[in-house]
Amino acid sequence: MNTSTNWDGTMIIGTLLIAIIYSIACLKLTGRVAAEKGYDRGSWEFAGLFLGILALIAVAGLPLNTNQVKNNNTEPSIDYTRKFCQNCGKTINSITHICDDCKE
Ligand SMILES: [Zn+2]
């Protein structure tokens, strides 16, 4: 029965694929929920990979990590004081636009 053997192989590959997709989905979702709540994304993605839906339920039940959320909400600070000189490539003051070496 060749068809039976082929079907078994397809079943195994299919089940493996579903298991991999499920693991990745849990990993991504758990990591995203964790990050949104202010927890370490990497650690929770790891938990999601091995615990699957359980990790997602666990992270969904967690309270907000307010300290981290506060930090995440602060806008990324852009360093306006750093700029590079077009002549020598050294770091110069972007407000004065004067390079210490070139005096330009
Ligand atoms: Zn310069």
Image (spheres, rainbow, N blue to C red):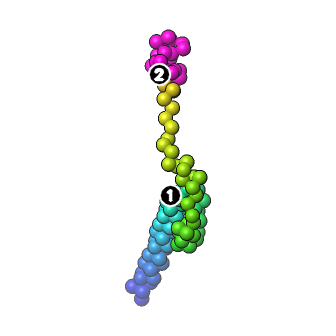
Q: Which residue is mark 2?
A: 95
Residue 52 sits in which quadrant?
bottom right
Relative to 75, does residue 34 appear above or below in the rendering? below
Q: Which residue is mark 1?
A: 36
Task: Identify the residue at horizontal 57%, vertical 64% (top origin).
Answer: 63
Query: Left or right: where does residue 59 sit relative to residue 94?
Result: right
Relative to 82, does residue 24 appear above or below in the rendering? below
Please, which residue is most extreme toward the top here?
103
Examine the structure image and report whether residue 100 is included in the region drawn in magenta. yes
Task: Identify the residue at horizontal 48%, vertical 43% (top origin).
Answer: 75
Mark 1 crowdedness (10 Å alpha carbons): few <14, some 14-19, many ≥20 = some
Q: Amino acid at mark 2?
A: Ile
Camera-side residue of 67 and 104:
67
Residues shaded magenta: 84-104
Examine the structure image and report whether residue 79 is included in the region drawn in magenta. no
Element carrying mark 2: loop
Which is nearer the N-term, disc 1 or disc 2?
1
Q: Are marks 1 and 2 in contact (CB under 8 Å)?
A: no
Q: Amino acid at mark 1?
A: Glu
Task: Identify the residue at horizontal 51%, vertical 32% (top origin).
Answer: 79
Counting from the top left corner in percent of width and height, residue 59 is at 56, 66
Counting from the top left corner in percent of width and height, residue 77 is at 51, 37
Mark 2 crowdedness (10 Å alpha carbons): few <14, some 14-19, many ≥20 = few
Please, which residue is most extreme toward the bottom here?
1
